[in-house]
Image (spheres, rainbow, N blue to C red):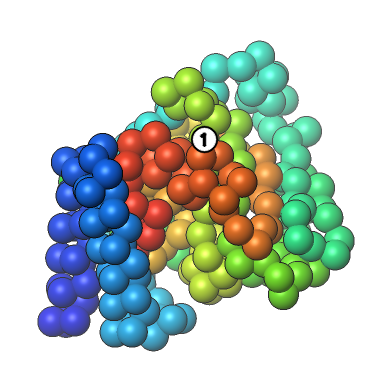
Amino acid sequence: MKRRALLAGLGAMFVGACSKVANSTAGSSLLSAAEDWHRKAHRALSNRTALVREYAKSAISPDFRGNGSLSVDTDAYRRHVVEGFKNWRLEVGGLVANPLSLSLEDLRALPQRTQITRHDCVEGWSAIGEWTGPQLSAVLEAAGISEDANFIVFRCADTLGGHKYYESVDMVDAMHPQTIIAHLLNGESLPIKNGAPLRMRIERQLGYKHPKYLTAIEAVASLDEIGLGQGGYWEDHHGYQWYAGI
């Protein structure tokens, strides 16, 4: 319990620091060092496949709020909504032997994992929800992921602050048993505000690492050529740290 509290405190401290000092050269260097230390400390102090807490149905929040993008403002997305997302595709590519193009039915046909977990937002709010979907590891294994892949990049349909949303994780979090491609929230299809039809659940990280409106998954060796090279929308444009473990 003390170890968990220590790690949670470290995460809150470094995430909070980002907004204050990320814009200076010295601050950027400090954050980079702090982030690296936090990541190494977290990995050293906890089992790499340890599960986050799962809750009883009685703990589910009455409303799971939306945050960030609450919809996708494009004609293509509005058509998908009208069609019930029957033509939505999830592309899986990059460093894989067998690129995939998966429909919602394809994803529903895979073994499913249901988990009731707490979502912790960097803004300070939390909510508990029941998520269902296939494990990301199963999809990556089906695609024949290469040993050269070090990161998984998530591409999204939404635009935030004038930029396409994307996020990324390393292979430890990608292969974690609680990392799933969620299509159900509390037993129902994902609401639009929560990322319909697909969103990631990266349960060992803060909420901004859980991208919504998922369209593609890409296995890469490096993040240097992805976006501005920092690993995600919030990291590239707002100085957030790439590793947001809790």
Asked whether the viewer can see residue 85, the reply is yes
- The residue lying toward the viewer, choosing from 231 and 189, is 231
Give the quadrant of residue 64. top left
Which residue appears at 75% of the width and 46% of the height? 91
- The residue lying toward the viewer, choosing from 209 and 80, is 209
User: Where's the N terminus, which quadrant?
Assistant: bottom left
Give the quadrant of residue 235. top left
Pointer 1: residues within 10 angstroms few (<14), some, or many (20+)? many
Residue type at mark 1 is Tyr
Image coords of residue 89 (percent x, y): 75, 40
Image coords of residue 60 (percent x, y): 31, 54
Residue furthest top in the image: 75
Query: At numbered mark 1, what does the secondary structure look like: helix, strand or loop?
Result: strand
User: Where's the C terminus, which quadrant?
Assistant: bottom left
Asked whether the viewer can see residue 64, the reply is no
Left or right: residue 6 compared with residue 154: left
Q: Is residue 200 above or below residue 178?
A: above
Image coords of residue 118 (percent x, y): 31, 58
Which residue appears at 65% of the width and 62% of the height? 221
- The residue lying toward the viewer, choosing from 52 and 91, is 91
Image coords of residue 75 (percent x, y): 66, 14
Q: Give the number of callouts.
A: 1
Q: Which residue is mark 1?
A: 165
Q: Is residue 119 above or below residue 50?
A: above
Left or right: residue 198 compared with residue 15: right
Which residue appears at 66% of the width and 58% of the height? 220
Left or right: residue 192 compared with residue 25: right
Residue furthest right in the image: 98
Q: Is residue 147 above or below residue 101?
A: below
